[in-house]
Amino acid sequence: MPLELPKKSPSALNQVVFLVGFMGAGKSTVGRALGQRLNWLFEDLDDRIERREGRKIEEIFRDSGEPAFRQAEHRALRQVLDELQGGTARVVALGGGAFVQKDNADLLEASGARTVFLDAPVEELWQRCCRQASADGIERPLLRSKQQFRKLHAARRAGYLQASVKVETSTRSVEEIAAEIADRLELQEIETRTEPGEVE
Ligand code: S3P
């Protein structure tokens, strides 16, 4: 399908950053910290999907299957990109599979928006996800066996490497990672927001 994206002005594109990477990479945690540092909005694409669909991610997977989830994810991403013009600066955390779907990667590339790959060794990603599952009750439909986790990670890594920049997250604090992203992408803190409240 041809990409039909309204052309965004350079200023709109300088005011959005997408965080990508595997499950457990810290996309939401780092995104929230980066948003706070810059006074930008923070948004988690999975939250937008849940609001739009009126169901939790795990329910979409369970009741409608992964292809239906991927379609919902793509629609939500399109909506984010459509809203950029004239909107408030924002950091968007994508779900772990979003950027490795070709239609999403193409959409992001055509938009010209910058993407940041949060990288970590697969063993550490697995440990983080297991900790989050037991401590915070975070359910991930694709967190099954360690073997499947490693296999999926290996299959996706080349896709993540297509992001505009790669940032190491292993053994670093959330604040250090957020500072590196702000610095490398020369993101500017804003004084006031034009929209009230956080999207989250
Ligand atoms: C997915 C990762 C999840 C969520 C969905 C699918 C994936 O997001 O989008 O369960 O395909 O890796 P997180 O990366 O935030 O866990």
Image (spheres, rainbow, N blue to C red):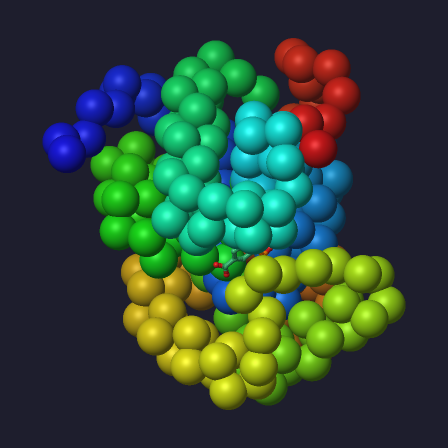
Q: Quadrant of residue 174?
A: bottom right
**Is residue 131 visible to the viewer in this orientation of the structure?**
yes
In depth, the one of 154 and 183 nearer the eye is: 154
Q: Is residue 78 above or below residue 149?
A: above
Q: In this view, does 45 lie above or below 24?
A: above
Relative to 59, 155 lies left or right: left
In this rendering, the count of numbered labels is: 0
Q: Which residue is drawn at 44% across and 65% down?
A: 166
Residue at the spot x=41%, y=43% of the render? 68
Q: Is residue 45 left or right of residue 73?
A: right
Left or right relative to 188: residue 84: left
Give percent across and percent down for residue 167: 51, 66
Q: Residue at x 63, y 36 (%)?
A: 55
Which image quarter has ligand 1? bottom right
Task: Judge by depth and name the residue closer to the eye, 188 or 26.
Answer: 26
Which residue is outermost to the right? 135
Of residues 168 and 4, which is closer to you in this image? Answer: 4
Considering the image in quadrants, where does the N terminus appear? top left
* One can see residue 185 in this view: no
Q: Residue furthest front?
A: 63
Give the residue displayed 72% in from the left and 75% down from the top.
Answer: 130
Please provide percent x and percent y for residue 150: 48, 82
Query: In the rendering, at what x and y percent does residue 162 appear?
Result: 31, 60
Q: Residue furthest left?
A: 2
Locate the C terminus by quadrant: top right
Please provide percent x and percent y for residue 16: 49, 34
